Image (tube, grey):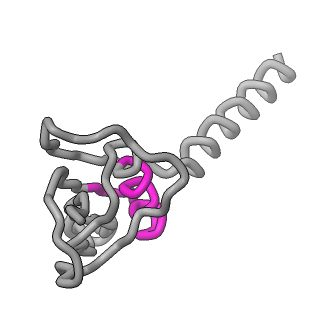
Amino acid sequence: MNSFLRSSLKLTFGLSFAVFCTSCVRVHRSCDPTLTAPKKDREISVYTSQPAFRGYRETVRYEAIGSNITSFDRVLSRIKSQAKRDGCEALVNVKFYKQPIGNGRFSSAFPKIEATGVIFED
């Protein structure tokens, strides 16, 4: 019985450690139905404002919220990987927020990013 209890405690600790270490990021998007096929091996540019040096067409709007153990870098990398799959060339109007969760003694703030995926027209 003692070995059964010990192995179940190890399993419980292992599962809770795995759940704690994996960060959860939810990405919501609204797409333009005329997206092109994704291009491989390219980097997604990130702009916090509207770039005036090139013309572009807005294709996808992204909103991603992380968890209390997720950083802004992790959330942005998830949006960039989704934008690559959607065929976007850049992200414009990227806004960084802290989404407050809870009120009181143990309140927290989750990282939240809003962005617009674009395709350059030139």
Q: Is 10 above or below relative to 38?
A: above
49 relative to 83 in the view: left or right: left
Residue 65 location, x and y as percent? 30, 56
Q: Is residue 56 highlighted in magenta?
A: no
State the extent of the magenta-drawn residues as a range: 64-82
Residue 69 in sight here: no
**Closest to the observer, 102 or 119:** 119
Nearer-the-camera pick, 117 or 54: 54
Residue 30 spot, x, y in % from top left = 15, 44
Indicate whether 73 appears above or below 63: below
The answer to whether residue 17 is left or right of residue 39 is: right
Quarter of the image where one finds residue 3: top right
- Can see residue 21? yes
| Quadrant occupied by the C terminus | bottom left
Measuring from the top left, give residue 47's x and y in whole percent. 29, 77
Residue 97 at x, y percent in the picture: 24, 73
Is-magenta flag for residue 68?
A: yes
The residue located at (55%, 48%) in the rendering is 22
Q: Is residue 12 above or below residue 22?
A: above
Residue positioned most to the front: 122
On-image quarter of the N terminus: top right
Instruction: Name the residue located 44 percent from the left edge and 51 percent from the top edge.
Output: 81
